[in-house]
Image (tube, coloured by chain):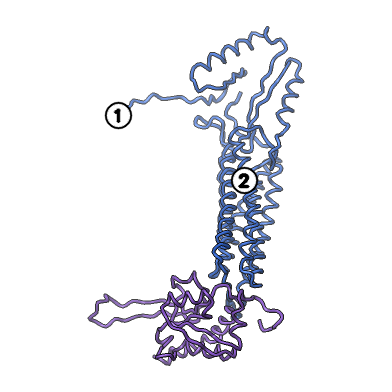
């Protein structure tokens, strides 16, 4: 049995993965341009600063995804016998945490603006000899970023589905956080134009609540993933029926009496064990020998909580590390 | 902004409405040649701009004097409509008030005659602004439009002083 094989994808999945990588690279470029556009209209007012910072933070999930995807398909080695598919979980964790931070920070910022009674000052700008209210330019810049973030988010959700990628789904949520908060900023600036100084802060505050909810929801998912939770469906806490389907398939084998399945998510891949009770159970010498061996091996170290002994036909690429005894005198 | 029924943006406490046909309350920081104070009268480049703004709005000008801190406080309480006097865009009080677009930017080379306690000549890059109360965006737009249309006049006035 090849113990060091990397995650293998069908051509269809590989194509989806390539699309995801291209999409995330495009995201980076688009978001940098959007951030630059907003930066140009920042002016002296605080109104746009929150939109700008959350736009910059949205750059981090695509970077995390692109870095993780370089590692994801690497074959297991001595240091990482289970391979690198968990790198996606790391990217997922970073994205979820950032989403939560953005939401909390936007809420804090909005509440402080209201408490301090900050009134946004939005004056004029002069471009090509024409003088106009900067608020129009801000709304224009925000509108373009809304469209960009909206499209990016929808595309990412579409690619997340075939790859069952929670990272991509979380990044799509980040884009949603962006376009909803930017949309709120447009409404806010429009209200400020009507003399309602609190418009900007209230709009931002309301939207930040939805972002916090999304961030929290994603964080629960990734924490579950890292805790080896039973695989859950994309974007929900509902457990998948895959373990049950595997168990049913195992029990349909004529030599199997009972089976049990244990699965966990490692980024885009699933790892797990299937325990089977053969029909000739107690009479089976191999099974009893395995049970005895398992008990015995578990006594080697107090930390060995669960060992599964799997008989295989042959072993290629043994991932067990070779320890080198080092002399500490030098 | 000229259509009476379709004013956008608007002020939060109606500063422009209060100034138009009424009183333009100006806080003055002395800073020749921008503002020159003699007793109760104020002259200088910025005073000239104030006078033309007031004329445009059919308002009469009321000057107030005091420290920068005092004047900015008055501005914040809406007891003043504008503070003038060689204010720089980089002034640390930028967060307490609404600074206009710069109406003049210069790079002044300050030459120091020898001997002096100052070591050498230095250059100051300076963006000149006025300070308005925060949130009065209709007022801010009006003032900025006035300043923008007078940018050449400001440069001319400075040149004539040299």
Which chain's residue wears label 1? A
Would you name the residue on which mark 2 appears? Answer: A216
Q: Secondary structure at mark 2?
A: helix
Which chain's residue wears label 2? A
Q: Nearer the viewer, residue A145 or B127?
A: B127
- Asked whether the residues under the numbered discs 2 and 1 touch, taking CB atoms below 8 Å apart as contact, a structural biologist would say no
The answer to which quarter of the image holds residue A167 is top right
What percent of the width, then of the height, locates residue B137? Answer: 60, 75
Quarter of the image for the N terminus of chain A: give it: top right
Q: Is residue A57 above or below residue A252?
A: below
Q: Which chain is purple?
A: B
A122 left or right, relative to A283: left
Quarter of the image for the C terminus of chain A: give it: top left
Q: Residue at x 64, y 69 (%)?
A: A196
**Disc number at residue A157?**
none
Q: Secondary structure at mark 1?
A: loop
Q: Nearer the viewer, residue B161 or A267?
A: B161
> In the rendered image of this protein, which colour is used for chain A?
blue
A15 left or right, relative to A117: right
Q: Residue at x 54, y 90 (%)?
A: B60
Q: Residues within 10 Å of mark 2 (few under 14, many from 20)?
A: some
**Disc number at residue A330?**
1
Q: Is residue A65 visible?
A: no
Q: Is residue A318 above or below residue A281?
A: below
Farthest residue in the left direction? Answer: B115
The answer to which quarter of the image holds residue B106 is bottom left
């Amino acid at each position: 049995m090849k113990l060091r094989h990397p995650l293998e994808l069908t051509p269809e999945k590989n194509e989806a993965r390539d699309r995801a990588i291209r999409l995330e690279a495009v995201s980076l470029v688009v978001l940098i341009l959007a951030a630059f556009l907003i930066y140009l209209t920042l002016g002296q007012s605080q109104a746009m600063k929150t939109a700008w910072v959350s736009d910059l933070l949205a750059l981090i999930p695509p970077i995390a995804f692109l870095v993780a995807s370089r590692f994801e398909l690497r074959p297991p080695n001595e240091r990482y016998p289970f391979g690198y598919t968990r790198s996606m979980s790391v990217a997922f964790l970073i994205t979820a945490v950032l989403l939560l931070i953005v939401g909390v920070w936007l809420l804090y910022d909005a509440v402080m603006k209201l408490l301090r009674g900050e009134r946004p000052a939005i004056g004029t700008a002069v471009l090509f000899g024409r003088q106009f209210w900067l608020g129009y330019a801000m709304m224009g810049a925000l509108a373009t970023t809304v469209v960009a973030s909206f499209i990016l988010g929808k595309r990412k959700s579409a690619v997340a589905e075939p790859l069952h990628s929670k990272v991509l789904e979380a990044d799509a949520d980040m884009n949603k956080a962006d376009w909803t908060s930017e949309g709120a900023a447009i409404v806010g600036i429009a209200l400020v134009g009507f003399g309602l100084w609190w418009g900007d802060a209230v709009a931002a505050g309301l939207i930040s609540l939805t972002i916090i909810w999304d961030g929290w929801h994603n964080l629960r998912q990734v924490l579950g993933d890292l805790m080896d939770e039973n695989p859950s469906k994309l974007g929900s806490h509902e457990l998948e029926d895959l373990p049950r389907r595997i168990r049913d398939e195992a029990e349909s084998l004529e030599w199997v009496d009972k089976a049990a399945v244990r699965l966990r998510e490692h980024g885009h891949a699933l790892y797990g064990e299937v325990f089977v009770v053969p029909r000739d159970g107690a009479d089976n010498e191999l099974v009893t020998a395995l049970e005895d061996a398992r008990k015995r091996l578990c006594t080697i170290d107090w930390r060995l909580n669960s060992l599964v002994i799997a008989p295989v036909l042959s072993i290629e690429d043994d991932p067990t590390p070779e320890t080198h005894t080092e002399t500490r005198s030098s | 902004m000229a259509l009476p029924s379709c004013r956008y943006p608007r002020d939060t406490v109606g500063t422009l409405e209060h100034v138009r046909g009424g009183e333009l309350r100006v806080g003055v920081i002395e800073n020749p040649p921008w503002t020159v104070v003699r007793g109760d009268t104020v002259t200088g480049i910025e005073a000239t701009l104030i006078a033309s703004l007031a004329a445009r709005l059919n308002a009469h000008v009321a000057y107030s004097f005091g420290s920068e801190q005092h004047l900015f406080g008055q501005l914040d309480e809406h007891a003043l409509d504008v503070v003038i006097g060689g204010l720089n865009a980089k002034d640390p009080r930028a967060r307490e008030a609404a600074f206009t677009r710069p109406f003049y930017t210069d790079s002044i080379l300050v030459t120091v005659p020898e001997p002096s306690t100052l070591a050498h000549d230095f250059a100051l890059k300076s963006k000149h602004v006025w300070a308005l109360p925060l949130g009065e965006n209709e007022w801010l737009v009006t003032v900025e439009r006035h300043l923008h249309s007078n940018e050449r006049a400001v440069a001319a006035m400075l040149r004539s002083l040299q």
